[in-house]
Amino acid sequence: MRRIFLLCCLSILLFGCNNDDHTEKGKFDIEGKVTEIPAGDHTVVVKNNDGAIYHVTLPENDVSSNYKLGDHLVIWTSEIDTSNPAIAEALHIEIQNEFE
């Protein structure tokens, strides 16, 4: 009986505390304007208010024709490679009306 109880407790600790969803609603990684849309590429180039430039790979279900130069984007990413220019893979992108 004691072994079953220990096994249940260990199972809860191992599986119950797993948090695979690392995103938080409202928290994003990159905000900026589209400065370039490379032809034939699945990326857009975004520049933020601080002048940092990001080459952003679009999500699988997205295409670069959805964006135009000057669009203000808010981007959630899986990770950002801090090379120069920075490279990021987008999980989700939203077009905002104004650049704040």
Image (spheres, rainbow, N blue to C red):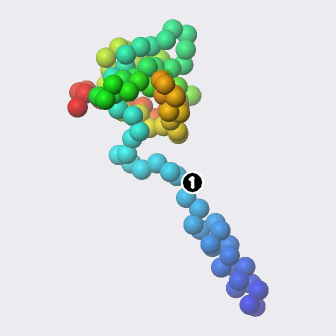
Type of residue at label 1? Asp
User: Which residue position holds label 1?
Assistant: 20
The number of numbered badges drawn on the structure is 1
Residue with the most extreme front position: 84
Quadrant where the C terminus sits is top left
Q: Is residue 72 left or right of residue 85?
A: left
Q: Position of residue 34 (x, y in %)?
A: 37, 19
The answer to which quarter of the image holds residue 13 is bottom right
Question: Is 10 rendered above or below residue 86?
Answer: below
Residue with the most extreme bottom position: 1
Q: Which of 94/50 is in front? A: 50
Q: Residues within 10 Å of mark 1 (few under 14, many from 20)?
A: few
On the question of residue 23 being in view, the answer is: yes
On the question of residue 62 being in view, the answer is: no
Residue at (57%, 54%) from the top-left corner? 20
Q: Position of residue 6 (x, y in %)?
A: 71, 83
Q: Is residue 36 left or right of residue 43?
A: left
Residue at (43%, 20%) from the top-left corner? 45
Q: Is residue 29 left or right of residue 78?
A: left
Question: Is 75 rendered above or below residue 24?
Answer: above
Q: Position of residue 73 (x, y in %)?
A: 35, 28
Q: Which of 66/90 is in front? A: 90
Residue at (68%, 72%) from the top-left corner? 11
Q: Position of residue 97 (x, y in %)?
A: 25, 26
Q: Secondary structure at mark 1?
A: loop
Residue at (50%, 20%) from the top-left corner? 43
Quadrant where the N terminus sits is bottom right
